[in-house]
Amino acid sequence: MIAMLATAGCEKKQRFVQKPESMSPTIEPEEVVVADMQAYNRAEPQRWDAVVMKAPPPYEDLWIKRVVGLPGEVIDFADGRVNVDGQPIVPPPHLSKVEYQAPMSVPGTPRPLIYPFKIPAGSYFILGDNPPKSNDSRFWGALPKTNIIGRVKDK
């Protein structure tokens, strides 16, 4: 969950406080970040963008996560890496030590997806930078673009 602090002087940028550890160490809990809330009015989300998103049901919060898979791609996991369309993707240097694993089924949590997973048109595969602490697309599937509401600056 993130909490909006204040508008940062203009309509298109807002400041947020990161609450959980799902994006640590890139964004630490309680760290204030600035997001461009109109970034995706003029462009599509890109792989590795950190985004402000409306959480999927049943959640009602705004979260910060990272775009990893794009519409139409097939996502799978192997050896701590994300594979897209059968090939491992190379993360940016600041994420090189993150190990993404397909989640195991845990009682009381959403049932994980079956992999390989094809991302529907108009949707994105969203992951946290701290996979063991992240509730993300590995559990609930692709996120519609309409849920992506801003791009976090410089993360």
Image (tube, rainbow, N blue to C red):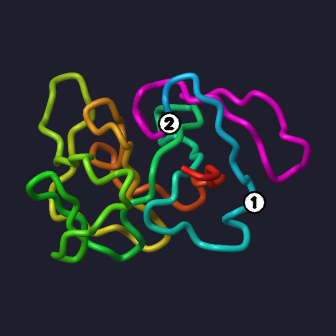
Does 150 sit above or below residue 29? below
Residue at mark 2 to residue at mark 1: CA–CA distance: 21 Å
Question: In x, y percent, where is residue 64?
Answer: 53, 41
Q: Secondary structure at mark 2?
A: loop
Residue 108 image point, x, y percent = 23, 22
Q: Is residue 14 magenta?
A: yes
Query: Is 8 situated left or right of 121 in this image?
Result: right
Q: Which residue is mark 2?
A: 27
Amino acid marked by disc 2: Ile
Q: Which residue is mark 1?
A: 38
Q: Quadrant of residue 63?
A: top right
Q: Locate residue 149 relative to residue 12 in the image: left or right.
A: left
Residue at 59 percent across and 28 percent down: it is 31
Q: Is residue 106 above or below residue 83?
A: above
Residue 40 lies in quadrant: bottom right
User: What's drawn in magenta, residue-wise?
Assistant: 1-26
Q: Nearer the viewer, residue 111 or 11?
A: 11
Crowding at mark 2 (Cα within 10 Å: few <14, some 14-19, many 20+): many
Q: Position of residue 110 (x, y in %)?
A: 27, 34
Numbered disc 1: secondary structure: loop
